[in-house]
Image (cartoon, helix red, strand yellow):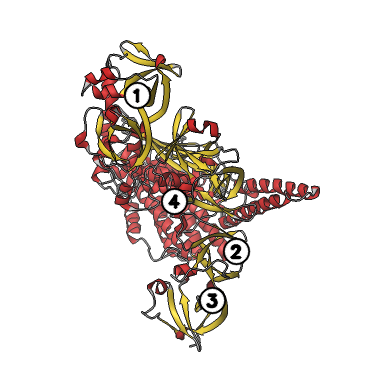
Amino acid sequence: MADEVMSEFLAEAGEILDGLERDLVAVDGGNLDPADVVAGTFRAFHTLKGTSGFLGFEKLAGVAHAGEDLLCAIRESQVVWSRGVTDALLEVLDALRAILGEAARTEKDGDNAYPDLVARLKALSEPGAAAGPEPKEAAAAPPAVEAAPAPVFQPRAPPPKLVRPPRGAPTSPPAPATEPAPPGSHAPRASEPHAEPGDAASTLRVPVPVLDRLMSLVGELVLARNQLICQEATREDARLAATSQRIHQLTTGLQEAVMKARMQPIDNVFSRLPRVVRDTAQVCGKQARLVTSGQDTELDKTLLEAIKDPLTHVVRNSVDHGIEGPELRLANGKAAEGTVAIRAFHDGGQVIIEVEDDGAGVNLTKVRAKAIALGLVTQEEADRLSERDTVDLVFRPGFSTADAVTQISGRGVGMDVVRTNVERIGGSVEMLSAPGRGCTCRIRVPLTLLIVPALIVTSKRERYAVPQASLVELVRISSEREAQMVVDVHGSLVLRLRGAILPLLDLATMLGTGNAGRASDGALSVVVLSAEGRQFGLLVDEVADTEEIVVKPLGRHLQALGAFSGATVRGDGRVALVLDVAGIARRAGLLAAGDARANRGVAAVRAGARRPYLILRGRDDGRLAIPLGDVARIEEIARERVEQVGGSEAIQYRGTVLPLVRVANALLERRKRPRLAAEEVPDKLQVVVQQWGGREVGLVVDSIVDVAEEEVALDPTRARPGVAGCAVIQGRITEILDTAALLAAQVGAAPEAPRG
Amino acid sequence: MAETIRICTFLLEGRTFAVPVAEVREVVKDLETTPVPLAPPAVLGLAHLRGQIATAVDLRHRLGLTARRQGDQSVNVVVQGAEGLVCLSVDEVGDVIDVPQGVVERPPDTLRPAVREVVRGICKLEDELVLLLDTERAVDPSP
């Protein structure tokens, strides 16, 4: 029984503190009048003091008492509310939280009585001690204690003076309630998302372990259901079939209901962020406000817990690195106060949380320089990075752009940890930057962790589950079309799919078990997957079925393989491994290896920086390469389609005009132009389509040889216009094209006079 | 001297090893495992044990002993590791015996490193020496 009282107290105290924090931050931001919170805060401390005294938590009672005294002095107009008061009260909240945390662990309230804080509160409570700088505004006429809307801790038998006042009875004019804490909104939303205060009869506080247990039992039930269906299929028994069907439906219903019980509004996490923004801005000498929307969006409790720290970090980063100082902002024609906007919404079985700031955006030059200085990439690698890849550098382990290591961030543990933590729960993080206008960090998380729909594929007679969240499409390649769709040269496979080219991996090869098998008619099965925004094809023996699976974690050693994210028990009782799609892409070098999961250190990260290249045959049988990441599609076009437009070549392509640049000419014009005369003109042109400056441009190449994936050591001394330098790829000297420079020189300016 | 620990003994290549009974969940004879590609060689695979997934580790391999031949009998001692259930595949399970704490000694320095690494102590019984394994280490498949 004592335990129950205790846990109830801890939960209620936590909610009271959360409510107070929202109010104090709102006061600080000028969104709430101090007069509106004095009474409520006073009573909250008083309640905490009373109950903690009852439970024997003297330290807690002492700190709460000192806070109560200060508020009492303010209420009696002996002391004027100031920033110093807000700061001190926020510190009181921190102290109380720390003590409560200790109490939750040890059932004692620890040794720290916070004498310094208590002394400071005492000093602030001295009459006339208008402590702290810049007193904001004098407290208005002391509001009647009983009338102000306030958080109320309701013990089982509430003393009369704690009775909740009627709602909507404010004593002072309503504050300019813009966000996020309108006065009187401290109804404990944490556990009663839709409950109006007062209808306690229809809600119930349930300990989380009970819900966890329920969820895992439902997981087991789903497995047993799958087994039942599997066994039932082998018998011809109509009654058994009907029963099994019924169990199937009930299980699904139960699963949904339990999942719903575990859902909580994301506001539980959002409510902490105004404080984070305030504190960070204060430490950095910036002005920032937080705007939230979609705080009703619901998410599984475990996931909510899991994104709390990453989200806090991202928000801190936005203020610390994103928002500029007030002077700079004014100079750039922005408001002195920066805005951090957080949005949460559902999108196809996932929850998306966007943190957007209106700051300076990611400084690409600075990020590149920093990454080079830290040894994360070489100068040559950095020069070749696309904008997106450059922004992505901030997710590398050990990366930090803060000029100075601040108290808040820039300690080298940063976005990489954010990415690791979010991916651990099956989510993803990406950063979008608009230089000068701000930065958006987009976090995607699944709705729930435990039970996920998956596609079952087979490889070498073993079954593997692929989470459907990463599935793009299934492609079956008949043997007739294989030559057209699968390009296999020197062991590197590429899938040509509706004009796009995708790297193609063989699951069996990746797992070291052989090569992908074929269906009886010789067809190949490809599963197109997406990880961290990159798509690739995965060759499997067979696509079997879709199934709801219950994912169980693997031990550290198997997790570290980076190929499997868990395992599941299937209907037949066998264990199937769940493929880690991002991990497999990373193993294949398709994704930057700068993932913190493996924690391999800087050297290994660099060694892992393998990138795929498209290898072309140049003149004189020389070899050229284009980073595959730059390539949008490869097309083969008939020579007749080439038209002359104002002295340039172009084709009509997908309803637009695609300017063509002949790579050979662009490079050769600086060498031995006369050779051109002897050139044979092929009927078909190979065109590499690439995004450039917001539109598409076609590079006409002689022939495409291969796709190679290697860690390339670029020798920049061999650079020439349009060529970034030389490197050895597949044992041969290859010139790496600098397509950006090449196109800059060619597009718009008149290209070579047409041949033939 | 009243302090005793109860150990479960088993045989590997004719030698007697043991783990504390408190750490043993059950002993299972036949176990169907799903191989884990890319895993350390000591990992036999994953097995399903009443709704839970256990990692099967070949203790012979883990201890650097000779490999088990196809068809040789084996038994699985299921222990609770820090990261889930682990099935330790052994040749044969022996007895459960109580040994006084006092007879557990430090393993001799002459033990082979691969064995010594996972041995927590050595118990001198009347007629044999029992190597007491450090379960946490034994379940770690990557020596």
Q: Position of residue A59 (x, y in %)?
A: 42, 63
Disc 4 designates what residue?
A562
Regarding residue A710, the answer to whether it shows in the image is yes
Instruction: Specify the amino acid type for callout 2.
Output: Leu
**Which chain does the residue under circle 2 lie in?**
B
Check disc 2 and report its element: helix, strand or loop. loop
Q: In percent of the image, x 45 and y 47: which residue is there?
A: A510
Disc 2 designates what residue?
B31
Q: Position of residue A756 (x, y in %)?
A: 32, 13
Query: Do residues under tags 4 and 2 come within 8 Å of each other at their CB atoms?
Result: no
Looking at this view, is A169 or B62 the one in front? B62
Query: Do residues under tags 1 and 3 come within 8 Å of each other at their CB atoms?
Result: no
The disc placed on residue A699 is 1
Crowding at mark 3 (Cα within 10 Å: few <14, some 14-19, many 20+):
many
**Which chain does the residue under circle 4 lie in?**
A
Q: Are labels 1 and 4 assigned to the same chain?
A: yes
Earlier-in-chain disc, 3 versus 2: 3
State which quadrant residue A569 falls in.
bottom right
Instruction: Specify the amino acid type for callout 3.
Output: Phe
Q: Position of residue A235 (x, y in %)?
A: 76, 51
Check disc 4 and report its element: helix, strand or loop. loop
Disc 3 designates what residue?
B10
Looking at this view, is A370 or B55 the one in front? B55
Instruction: Tell which tag, 1 or 3, sits nearer the viewer.
Output: 1
Q: CA distance from mark 1 to mark 3?
A: 69 Å
Instruction: Specify the amino acid type for callout 1.
Output: Leu
Q: CA distance from mark 3 to mark 4?
A: 34 Å
Check disc 1 and report its element: helix, strand or loop. strand
Crowding at mark 2 (Cα within 10 Å: few <14, some 14-19, many 20+):
some
